[in-house]
Structures are given as structure tokens and as C-alpha cells.
Image (tube, rainbow, N blue to C red):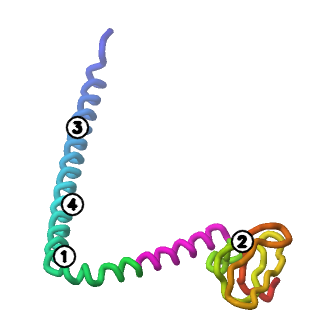
Amino acid sequence: MKSDKKESKTNEGIVKETRKTLEAAKSWVVDDAHLATAYWHHKMGYMEAWVSAHWHLVLEKGHDALEDLEEIEDLGLLWLVDHVNQNPVPLAHCHTAGSRCEAGEYLCMSCNQNQTLEISTELEVCDNCGYGVFSNHPKSAEE
């Protein structure tokens, strides 16, 4: 079978151009990787030097900062769950049977029966349906 010389020359040119493009892209990626590696080594070295110079501050203040971060994380998670699930009652206002609660009215989340606590005590399971999740969320004017 004969090959067309004109077409084979065109294909060779495309192959050569593709090779050049790939080699340039490879060197660009490698250069970027080296720059990123150097940057992070520099950043981590600076951070390690700061921590070793100020380790006493990290030990003294670290526990409080961790508690603050955990509290912020918990609040963020509650907000996310409330809004993603479109909960009618925010989780911060939900209480389970057996948990100690302040005096007030607690509404069963299953059958809407009220459980009134006169003093701060533990919630009981619902007398009506046996469910154990309650809300003390104030009703909106629309309901």
C-alpha cells in the first residue's frame, strides 16, 4: 500500500508540535512544583522557628484556643445541619429524654404533647407516644 507523502509530512509536523507542547507543559509543571515546594518549606520553616521561640505561649494559650475552635466548629455544624435539612426547630432548641433541662414547656417532636417542667430536672419520655425528643423553641406568629 502506498502512503501519501504530502499527508505524512503534515502528520509529522503535528506530531512534532504536539511533542514540543507536551515537553513545555511538563517543564512548566515541574517548575511550578519546585516553586510550590520551596514556598511551603520556607513557610513551614518560619512556623517551626516561631513555635520553638514561643513554645511557652503555645502551651499556655493553646488549650483555650482549642476549646474556642471546638465551640465555633460545633456552632457551625449546628447551623449547617439546621439549614441544609431545613429543620423546623433548630437543633440548639432540641432536648432528649433523660437530659437535664431548665423549667419551662417542652413540646414532643412526634405528637406535639406538652411536657411542663416546674423546676430544673430531667425530661421524661413522652407519656402519649413514647418519643424522646422535645423542643422548647418558641412558636412563630405564622403558626
Does 32 sit left or right of 3 as displayed?
left
Alpha carbon distance from label 4 to label 1: 22 Å
Specify which label sits upstream in the sequence, 3 or 2: 3
Q: Which residues are magenta?
A: 69-86
Residue 106 in percent (x, y) is at 75, 82
The mark that comes first in sequence, 2 or 1, is: 1
Tell which tag, 4 or 1, sits nearer the viewer.
1
Badge 3 or badge 4: first in the primary sequence: 3
Of 120 and 132, nearer the camera is: 120
* Residue that badge 3 annotates: 19
The kind of secondary structure the magenta stretch mainly shows is helix
Judge depth for marks 1 and 3 and give the one in front: 1
Q: Nearer the viewer, mark 2 or mark 1?
A: 2
Identify residue type, mark 3: Arg
**Quadrant where the image shows the N terminus:** top left
Residue type at numbered disc 4: Ala
Residue 68, quarter of the rendered image = bottom left
* Viewer-proximal residue among 58 and 75: 58
Which residue is at the front of the view, 19 or 41? 41
Residue under circle 1?
Answer: 51
